[in-house]
Image: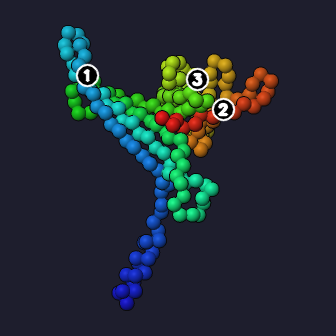
Amino acid sequence: MKIKILALALTMFVSVQAQKENKDKIVETKTRVINVMEDGKMIEKKVMVKTTKEQEIKTDPNYKGKLNAPRVFPATKVSKVIYIDNDNDPFYDETATVTYYQKDGMVYNFNPTDSGFEIVDNKSKKMIGNARFSNNAEVYLFNTKDYSGIGYFKDNMFVVEYYDDEGTLIIEKFNDSKL
């Protein structure tokens, strides 16, 4: 009887396991110590940059259901967290997060702010626009110097929708960066 109860308990717990979505994830951490002259004194500051690259593991959909299907490489999402230590204690005083996306071959930084995030061109460091939180947690209010609209994240993309001067709906998509 004990064996039956044990076998029943094992089969119940084994079938409950869930499978996560398969992803490749690379985390790289670099730390630099910088000596800065402030008020005539040399002060040591530390900067740590933690870079995370994530990519889904997918196979060619033409080989669905077959063994040893060739792998396809979808876009990679790259995010950096920058930690700054201004004094000589073991804790970091400031953090900043940057996520990279691309659109039409250009790479853009998504820099978080208190009210949402800014989109900055990675090469020229010029601000393209900003997205602010709205009452709906899934939608952002998006503003540039040329237009205003809404933005939301869908399928690893940031999608912006707005109307041009003629009343035509324009949809722009920022894909995960392939950096």
Q: Quadrant of the N terminus?
A: bottom left
Q: Amino acid at mark 2?
A: Glu
Residue 115 shows in the view: no
Q: Are marks 1 and 2 in contact (CB under 8 Å)?
A: no
Disc assigned to residue 34: 1
Measuring from the top left, give residue 7's x and y in whole percent.
40, 82
The residue lying at 54 percent from left, 49 percent from top is: 72
Mark with earlier residue (1, 2): 1
Mark 1 residue element: strand
Between 158 and 140, the one nearer to me in the picture: 158
- In front of the other: label 1 or label 3? 1
The residue lying at 22 percent from left, 22 percent from top is: 44
Inter-mark Cα distance, 2 to 3: 13 Å
Disc assigned to residue 149: none
Inter-mark Cα distance, 1 to 3: 33 Å
Disc assigned to residue 129: 3
Mark 3 residue element: strand
Residue 52 shows in the view: yes
The residue lying at 60 percent from left, 59 percent from top is: 63
Residue found farthest to the bottom: 1
Q: Amino acid at mark 1?
A: Ile
Which residue is the site of mark 2?
A: 172
Q: Quadrant of residue 83?
A: top left
Mark with earlier residue (1, 3): 1
Q: Are marks 1 and 3 in contact (CB under 8 Å)?
A: no
Inter-mark Cα distance, 1 to 2: 41 Å
Q: Is residue 5 left or right of residue 22?
A: left
Q: Is residue 107 above or below residue 70?
A: above
- In front of the other: label 2 or label 3? 2
